[in-house]
Structures are given as C-alpha cells and as structure tokens.
Amino acid sequence: MRIFVGYGYNERDKWVEDYVLPLLVAFGCEVVHGKAVYGGALSDEVIKAIRTADAMIGFTTRRESVAAGQYRTHEWVVQELMTAHAQDPRIPWVEIREEGVISPGGIIESADAQRIDHRQEDLAGCMIKIAQAVRRFHDLTNVTMIRLGPTSAVDQISPLLDDPSFACACQILRGAIQLAPRRTAVFPIKGGVFVQLRGVSQGDLVRISISARGRIWRSKLRIGGYCRCTGEGVAVALSIQQSQEYVGSNRWRWSVWLNGTPEELDSVDYVTYILHPTFHDPVRRISDRTTNFRLDTSGWGTFTMHANIVHRGGHQTTLNHDLVLLYPDGKPMLA
C-alpha cells in the first residue's frame, strides 16, 4: 500500500520522520511525501504523488500563533488533504490535528473522514491511533478482482469497453448497511474480463452493474470471485448446493456440489473442499465434472466449509457454505 504523508518540514515535526514514517514502512507501506518540493502552491509532482497513492495521512500541526493557545497549520498540508479528497474515487485519508490548531474549515471540516486529535505530550497514544488508521486503510484499499461471466454476456460487454457511454459501478452490502454505488474499473485480462474492486472486506456482498449504449447488465449481491451478468436481467453465479440424510444416532450422510450453468461448470478444472479439522482427511479434491464436482461423505455436526474452485484459465474462486443437517421431524441439528 502506498501512503502519501503530508506534514511540517521543521524541527518541531521531526517526530513524524523519526517515528511515523518508520512505522508505516514496518507495516509494509510505501511512503511518499512532498518534502523536496514544498512551498507555495502544490507542484504537479506532489499532485501526481497524491493521485497515485492508495491513502493519505495529513498532520495539521502548529505553525504560527494567532492568539493565546491558537495556531494556524501548514497550508500545503491542507491543500494535500483537499487534493486527496477531490479524487474520484476518493482517496481515503485521515487528518492528525494537534491540540490548539484552528480548524482549516471547508471540505476538511465537513468531510466524512477520520480525524485524530493529538497532544505533543502524548505521541505514544497518537502512534497507536495511526496504526489503527493504517489497518483501516488496508481494509479500504484491499483490491479484489472479480471475473465476469458467462461468456455470452462477456462477448456482449467486451466490444463496448472503450465506448464513451460505458460505465461500471459496484455496490457493497456490509452487514445491514448498503453502501452507495461506486464507479470501478473493468479490465480485459487473459482468461476473461475482470472488475477491480477496492475496499471489499471479508463477508461483504457485492453487486456489479454495467451499462453501455442503453443496455444494462447486472449481477446479484454475492461474495466476490466470479460474477455472472445478464443483459436487462438478474444474474446467478456458481454456488454450493447440498443434500443430507439422517441415518440415526445423530449422524448424517450428506453431499455438496457446484451449481451453475453448463458453461460455468465447464470452466472449472477442480474443486478443493476444506472441511472441519475433525474430519479424517479434511481437504478433499474433486475433479469429476460429470457429477458437478460432487463430494459425498458423512458426519455428525454442522460447520462452515470452504470450496476453492480452480478454473481452467488459472484463476481461482473461493465459496463458503454453511452445512445444514435436519432431523426427520425437520428440526435443525445445532452444532
């Protein structure tokens, strides 16, 4: 992750270079800043560095005193934060505001962004909050590639990728909260057409909408990996289906397999099912297309299994499935 850091290039703020920048590097981040070219209006070099960053941290620390206990901050840091905020899609940023600094006002004050208040006497507490912010940046900037399908829909979409009317939007359902749709990029890559999503966390559901020349392709809300779109319609995707049979003594025979169109299933090379660790041989590889990659086994409890689907093009999809076991009277087995 590439983080742009805006701060005061003076002795008083040297702690940013001594402690914060090494902390970011320790988190595996690439750190960029505008120290070499600061002063006056932002240079094209600094603006480019911000635009190519994944996130930004801006330190609005004390610069000159305007009244007792009140200070202005570094104007270039405010400009850098505003530049990050103005990008589309917006670059996630956090302001570290020192005690006594007058609010920059405008977009910085009204934006729905994180702000960390700090005192020079409590740099340790500030460092902890910065580390937490970096973790949040990792979640927000996490990149997920979703392959579009089926081929019939991709064949319709591919010729329109460079059309001026082409647009792709992603909507995320996070728990009970439905986030606003965001524009996202589409890439033709060997093996298919892929949508690049940022900020998709584990467990989020994703809906992709593509429009061009008056046509619309949509997918259902689903966990990323493989996204099947249809024109002017609702999509389905590869999923895990199951059957189960109670055999007595709190044990069941059960099976799981892939569900999808023949085209989708033909694209699969093999499936690796990862079962509960109490199973003998909990990792099972199934490559039989004729059974829809069916796994037959038995057990006594419910759990969440994972299916790693390896496609013939080389890319992989991971699906999760909560095994459901029922007694003959229809009551569920509770693990």
Image (tube, rainbow, N blue to C red):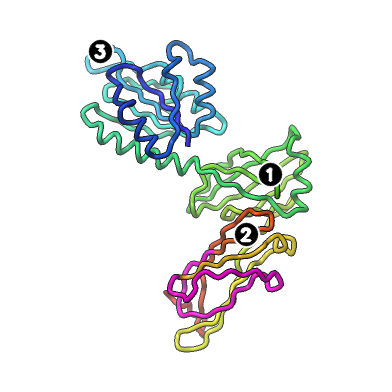
Magenta range is 277-306
Vertically, is 319 above or below 68?
A: below
Q: Label 2: which residue?
A: 310
Question: Which element type, helix, strand or loop, lies under badge 1?
Answer: strand
Question: Residue 210 location, x and y as percent?
Answer: 69, 44
The residue singled out by tag 1 in the image is 189
Q: Are marks 3 and 2 in contact (CB under 8 Å)?
A: no
Name the secondary structure under disc 3.
strand
Q: Which mark is residue 67?
A: 3
Residue type highlighted by circle 3: Ala
Q: Position of residue 1 (x, y in %)?
A: 47, 37
Answer yes or no: is residue 133 visible: yes
Residue 251: x and y in percent read: 48, 84
Quadrant (top left/top right/bottom left/bottom right) for the C terminus: bottom left
Q: Tell me if residue 323 comes above or below residue 268 in the rendering.
A: below
Q: Earlier in the sequence, mark 3 or mark 2?
A: 3
Residue at the spot x=47%, y=23% of the render? 82
**Could you say which disc has been placed on residue 176 in the image?**
none
> How dense is the environment of label 3, judged by Cα within 10 Å: few (below 14), some, or many (20 and up)?
few
- Relative placement, left or right, of 189 versus 50 is right
Q: How many marks?
A: 3
Label 3 – label 1 distance at C-alpha: 59 Å
Percent coordinates x, y for residue 49 in the rendering:
51, 24
| Residue type, numbered disc 2 | Val
Q: Name the one closer to the observer, 266 or 167.
A: 266
Q: Quadrant of residue 110?
A: top left
Q: Mark 3 near mark 1, Cβ–Cβ under 8 Å?
A: no
